[in-house]
């Protein structure tokens, strides 16, 4: 990016590995209602894919090569990409705080040594390099030395104090805001209105209420325990829309059940949705169109089979050996209970490309380091 601010420069020093470590650190601080949602959001907007597109000589050609369909640009969804997080309710406060925090970076860069660093306008909490440290930041060097996780926690804490909101409900959405700045750029981030994309009725729901709804299973009647009963389960594909539900039978895959929902003009909403709310194309785990995130009920889906596990890694959506991960292919995930899912606005096949790119970069780094060692040896001689 051109004309990067000091905050953007700091963020851009963090690659996928650094962000993974950051999220692992933050997990224990995120409220249960958003713990899965935060992981899903970061899977929906992978940093390596963004960087590959940014660095490509021909961005459009690469997008076609990777079969990217739908809206995969985070800069187009600054206020809406995280609508499925509970923390989305506090987006206006968090967005404003992150903007002020980014501006504070410029002040720290320009300030004289000895001047304290505070998140201007979002509380009076001093920004510390590490928890329980008594010395406020007074230089850019000290700011850079503070971990990304600590800075996210600092902003979440400041917003929580000012707005009287449980900090645990703010950590996930604050991490999302930081990544959004990294991918969309601070200027675009500031231009976004900062509006909430859910109605007042759903915004009033408590975290506990949502967790109860996710855990609830459909009643199968008095004889529901019998194997002969044709059990049906509810799939919720948008927790902020009372009409975003459909039924499927025991052991049906998520995509098959979705195809029976003809309540809306799906193709008008999203051209990828040819027969229901979940985009589908092949039904055999060959295209990657039907990937979804599982907000609640991951344990009620059948284990990932060999083909799903192989293909979901090839597509680039997730790389894990977990039997019941948070990212699934809807055409393969068979339901054994009610679940709550979220549908990403895009799909593609980029896993192999990104792995090849990483291998090339790793090789280049090794060659550079080796060349440097040789040069040092010659200098000593």
Image: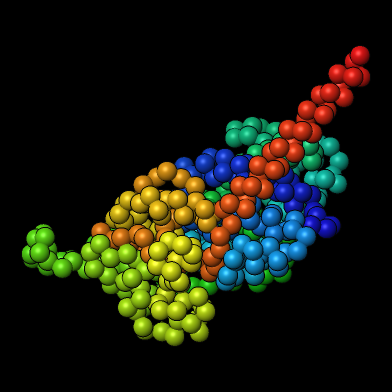
Question: Which quarter of the rendering shows the N terminus?
Answer: bottom right
The residue lying at 40 percent from left, 79 percent from top is 275
Specify the quadrant of the image occupied by residue 108. Answer: top right
* Left or right of 225, for residue 69: right
Q: Say whether residue 309 is visible.
A: yes
Specify the quadrant of the image occupied by residue 240. Answer: bottom left
101 to 241, vertically: above or below: above
Specify the quadrant of the image occupied by residue 142. Answer: top right
Using the image as rendered, state which of residue 90 and residue 70 is in the foreground.
70
The residue lying at 79 percent from left, 33 percent from top is 368
261 to 36, vertically: above or below: below
Q: How is the image coloured?
A: rainbow
Q: Position of residue 247 (x, y in %)?
A: 28, 72
Q: Position of residue 24 (x, y in %)?
A: 52, 41
* Left or right of 221, for residue 205: right
Q: Say whether residue 92 is visible.
A: no
Q: Residue furthest top?
A: 381
Q: Position of residue 75 (x, y in %)?
A: 66, 66
Q: Position of residue 105 (x, y in %)?
A: 76, 49
């Amino acid at each position: 990016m051109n004309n990067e601010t000091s905050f953007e420069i700091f963020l851009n020093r963090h690659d996928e590995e650094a962000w993974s470590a950051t999220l692992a650190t933050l997990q224990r601080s995120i409220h249960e209602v958003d713990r899965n949602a935060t992981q899903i959001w970061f899977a929906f907007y992978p940093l390596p894919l963004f960087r590959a597109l940014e660095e490509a000589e021909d961005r459009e050609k690469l997008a076609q090569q990777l079969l990217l369909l739908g809206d995969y640009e985070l800069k187009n969804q600054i206020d809406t990409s995280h609508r499925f997080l509970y923390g989305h309710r506090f987006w206006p406060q968090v967005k404003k705080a992150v903007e002020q925090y980014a501006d504070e970076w410029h002040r720290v860069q320009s300030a004289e040594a000895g001047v304290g660093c505070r998140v201007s306008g979002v509380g009076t909490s001093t920004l510390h390099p590490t928890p329980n440290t008594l010395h406020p930041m007074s230089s850019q060097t000290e700011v850079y030395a503070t971990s990304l996780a600590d800075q996210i926690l600092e902003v979440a804490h400041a917003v929580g104090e000012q707005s009287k909101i449980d900090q645990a409900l703010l950590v996930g959405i604050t991490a999302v805001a930081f990544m959004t700045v990294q991918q969309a750029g601070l200027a675009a981030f500031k231009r976004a209105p900062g509006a909430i994309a859910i109605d007042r009725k759903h915004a009033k729901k408590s975290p506990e209420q949502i967790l109860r709804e996710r855990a609830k299973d459909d009643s199968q009647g008095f004889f529901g325990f019998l194997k002969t009963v044709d059990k049906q389960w509810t799939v919720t594909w948008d927790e902020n829309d009372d009409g975003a539900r459909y039924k499927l039978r025991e052991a049906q895959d998520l995509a098959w059940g979705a195809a029976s929902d003809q309540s809306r003009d799906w193709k008008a909403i999203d051209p990828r949705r040819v027969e229901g709310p979940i985009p589908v194309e092949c039904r055999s785990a060959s295209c990657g169109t039907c990937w979804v995130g599982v907000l609640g009920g991951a344990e009620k889906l059948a284990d990932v089979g060999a083909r799903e596990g192989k293909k979901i890694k090839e597509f680039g959506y997730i790389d894990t050996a977990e039997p019941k991960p948070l990212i699934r292919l809807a055409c393969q995930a068979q339901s054994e209970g009610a679940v709550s899912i979220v549908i990403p606005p895009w799909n593609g096949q980029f896993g192999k490309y990104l792995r090849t790119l990483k291998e090339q970069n790793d090789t280049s780094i090794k060659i550079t380091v080796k060349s440097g060692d040789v040069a040092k040896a010659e200098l000593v001689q």
